[in-house]
Image (cartoon, rainbow, N blue to C red):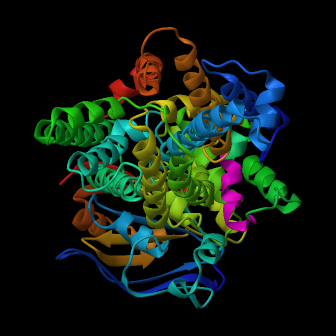
Amino acid sequence: MKLDLAPRLRAEHLTIRRGARTIVSDANLALNAGELTVLAGANGAGKTTLARAMAGLIPCEGRITIDGTALTAMSARERARALAYLPQGHEFHWPMSVAHIVALGREPHADPFSRTSTDDRAAIVRAMEATSTDYLADRIVTTLSGGERARVALARALATDAPVLIADEPIASLDGRHQLMIMELLRDIAHRGAAVLAIIHDLMLAARFADRVILLDQGRIVANDEPILALTAERIAQIFNISVHRVETPDGPLLLPSRPL
Amino acid sequence: MASDPQGRLLTVLLAALVAVLFAVSLMTGPAHFDAGIVMKALVSDQGVASIIVHDVRLPRTLLATLIGATFGIAGAALQGLLRNPLAEPSLFGAPQAAAATAAGLMAFGLVSPTSLAVPLGGILGALVSVGALVAIAGRHASLTMTLLAGLALASLAGAAIALILNLAPNPYIALEIAFWLLGSLRDRSMIHVWIAAPFMIASWIVLAANARAFRALTLGEDAAASLGVDVGRVRILVVIGVALGVGAAVSVAGAISFIGLVAPHLVRRFYGSDPTRTLLPSALAGAALLLAADIVVRLVPGPLEIKIGVVTALIGVPFFLAMIFRERRVLEEAP
């Protein structure tokens, strides 16, 4: 049975508007230390908007706190140390080395005039070992495959050593094996004490790896629970307009999408 | 990671190259003086030698150094901000806008060419054009969008210059402006140096102060923001920094293009493509390139001196074409 987990990031009454349109309305959620939370919802449900607001990247109504301190009361540097954000798409614009890219995760800790510290080096090595990217250290990031880029992007976010990690579609456009690898990695990171939120489209993987699933439907949170309780066939039919079969396997219950409704 | 011996050595070599070219530039001209006399003439009264070295060659050499460095650092900073190796102040119309404003002020006799209003007007023109570019191309500034918006702005500034020449009160002024627009460091005095230098140095300071953000921006704007970079502030400050430097440079020397594209590209690979570390070497490479070009125009024999802007464009345009050719695959994939 699960322990009572400590909420790291708490979002209360978040409402996000863009012009006249309300993208997210009155969202309440907590990211707990030691938990991998998956945020799922149909295209356009407001997942990315909610994630960006929680990362402090866009303004919103309501209150976001990390360990009790309001996000708006933190300096950009304090926020960057408390929360790592991995955006969609894994952009790398310059042909820099992988080691150099991962080191960018240490920017929030860096003094303008000091060199890389031993703490920095240790964190970079840990992040690269965790993501199995250490053998890529000297490779040029723009020459890597999609799966390698996804792992390097994650290593960069991990190098910050932030207690909260928010990852927007970290497994989009990856093949099956890499999807499983990244999901396992996110779960391991959480189980070692971080509060992790990942936006995932694949409900099967969400059910398989998440400790908690939050479902977003047209900007409203309609479920926030253990995967088995959140991902009911009725709810999936209602939100995603698909029918699923629940299959018992040695790895636990799996959801198999069956057909569009 | 933060520094490596190869990059440092190259930085030192580039600085030495600038120093050598600076000295050669002081010795280049129709009147021949020995190196010893030139150095003495700089600091003490050596009669004719002092007048020529001090009043003719020194301003020209100082301007070549300052302007080359300004274009180099401005190009490197714009490339860092837009995450795009083809970004260059003159591709976006900033120098053209500065030239149009300065030409307008001169054509209608509002101010004398040595007045502080010329560089100030030039800076304002450059500021408006770079601001418009960022506003039009938008936050996610794709390659295609940025180049198209820049082309439009450069064309608009070109049309404004044509209009000014068209409406110039007399043909003598029109011809004067047309020649000025070709870009030259000839017949500039220390007054020009004093007018432009503060703006250029201010631009270096503004750009260098924001350089650290370029490294994080390689991950895109959201990731950079999550690493503590105030992306909006950096964007505005870089735009202001580029406009300050380029505006001042163009206002005293006319249109000198492509240094900002060529200089960062020459040095980047030696600094691990780190857009932050590329700034200083780009400034040094820019200064060396413009000093060399200005020495070349004085050595080419002929009744008329070739304008330095013509030389940089003649070298820069084929270089730009070569870069487009190399980036062809990326450009064809662009949305």
Instruction: Please state which of residues A51 and A242 is positioned toward the viewer in this rendering.
Output: A51
Give the farthest residue toward the top.
B301
Task: Specify start and end residues of the magenta stretch as a single range.
Answer: A101-111
Magenta span dominant secondary structure? helix
Point 49% across, 34% down: residue = B187
Instruction: Please state which of residues B251 and B92 is positioned toward the viewer in this rendering.
Output: B251
Identify whether A38 is placed above or below B133.
Answer: below
Point 64% across, 85% down: residue = A6
Point 64% across, 77% down: residue = A78
Q: In the image, is residue A108 part of the stretch drawn in magenta?
A: yes
Q: Is residue B308 left or right of residue B228?
A: left
Identify whether A120 is placed above or below B255.
Answer: below
Instruction: Please state which of residues A260 and B113 is positioned toward the viewer in this rendering.
Output: B113
Q: Position of residue A116 (x, y in %)?
A: 81, 56
Q: Is residue B116 left or right of residue A176?
A: left
In which quadrant will I find the C terminus of chain B? top left
Instruction: Please state which of residues A70 and B303 is positioned toward the viewer in this rendering.
Output: B303
Point 71% across, 65% down: residue = A161
Give the farthest residue toward the left.
B167
Q: Position of residue A241 (x, y in %)?
A: 22, 59
- Residue A166 in view of the camera: no
